[in-house]
Image (cartoon, rainbow, N blue to C red):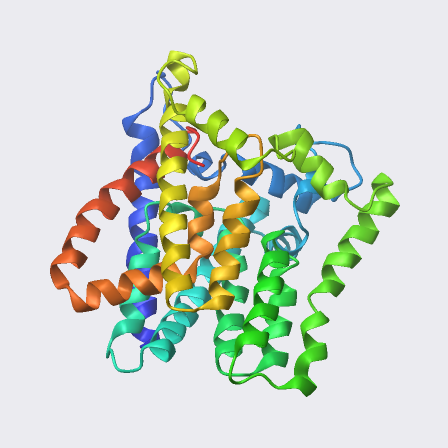
Amino acid sequence: MTREVLGWWLVTRVGLFLLSISAPLLFNRGTDYPDVWRAWVQWDVWHLKALAEFGYNNGEPSQAPLAAFFPGFPLLVHLVHFTGVGYFGAGIVVSAVASAVAGVYLARLAQYEFPELKGLGPNAAVVWYGAPVGVFLAAGYTEALFCAFAFPAWLAARQGRWARAAIFVALAATVRVSGIFLACALVVEFITSKKRDWPSAPWLALPAIPVLGFMAYLKQIHGSWFAWQEAQEKGWAREFTWPWESLVHTWDAASRGHFAGERSDWTWMFRAELVTLVIGLLLLAWLLRRRSWGEAAWVAATVGAFCTSFWIYSLTRATLLWWPLWIGLAVVVHRHRWLGRLYLSVAIPLAAIWAAGFFTGRWTG
């Protein structure tokens, strides 16, 4: 199974590499030959690179408050860059290795949940690698590394190995604020699991250590325990907004004419966010119906966090963290082959469009 998953990982990485070369050439509007290597250097890649290079206590070298980003990914990038690949290259290397590890564990988790469906594991990895927003598993973003910790964490939790699960969740909590939601979901899973082991319960507090440590560090630098949240509000309009108001703002942003003509990519991305919100709510309803309480808590917390910002955005990328979505799709594909062909006929073109948009500097979530 592992070899098959890694085969699909390699195929999809090659495809994204070809897109990274061809998209800048195809959409080049200037007379100079474009620097195709810079196709990978877009959006948050700049901020994460600046954080890996300068740390938290050197102003805003990328013109954004860097306290918004958790330290796990930049720290690894900083270490890998000593191999000589540079900071941008190190980010790609970290995501490449992490996406391979995460795909393997997603396959194992899927097969563990549905042992009667032979070959389900690799199918889950395929639909995940081929996701419309799959480019963020290859770029120097945090999604792949988070999943490399979150997927084995949940597999351990389902197996009743709570200490191992807590260690992986603690590692995930160094990468993204989503680790806090994952820690809460782990507690729900423990309470509702038939394999709960009360002597192991103290392990569930372990993820709080890196989070509180990071907050204490930011308190020393910026004078606030919640400097990361304040940075999110300052740089990305993540201030608390009631969900119905956030939905109105997002609907307005997705409407024709809200942005100038040259920013039509923003309009389409906000439309994608609304579609993703519907998918998230349907997934949540399915998990509640199956009484998958831990996974339902995970998806609900993620959706809730994105729906309480001024706008709902970056939820499209967050779907990569929803292992129940990709395992559920794999089950549907396994039982109804024609739906698998339909999924691929939609997902592959969307993935190519999303990747081309990212590689040419358009906002892609």
45 displayed left or right of 334? right
Q: Name the residue: 33% across, 23% down.
A: 28
Quarter of the image for residue 288 reads bottom left
Q: Position of residue 64 (x, y in %)?
A: 66, 31
Q: Position of residue 125 (x, y in %)?
A: 33, 64
Q: 78 or 268, which lies in front?
A: 268
Query: Number of labelled discs?
Result: 0
Q: Name the residue: 25% across, 47% down.
A: 347
Up the image or down, 148 lies above or below 220; here it is below
Asked if residue 224 can be seen in this view, the reply is yes
Up the image or down, 105 lies above or below 79; here it is below
Q: 235 or 273, which lies in front?
A: 273
Q: Name the residue: 34% across, 38% down.
A: 354
Q: 65 or 199, which lies in front?
A: 199
Q: Position of residue 169 (x, y in %)?
A: 61, 67
Quarter of the image for residue 362 reads top left
113 displayed left or right of 88? left
Q: Name the residue: 54% across, 46% down.
A: 304
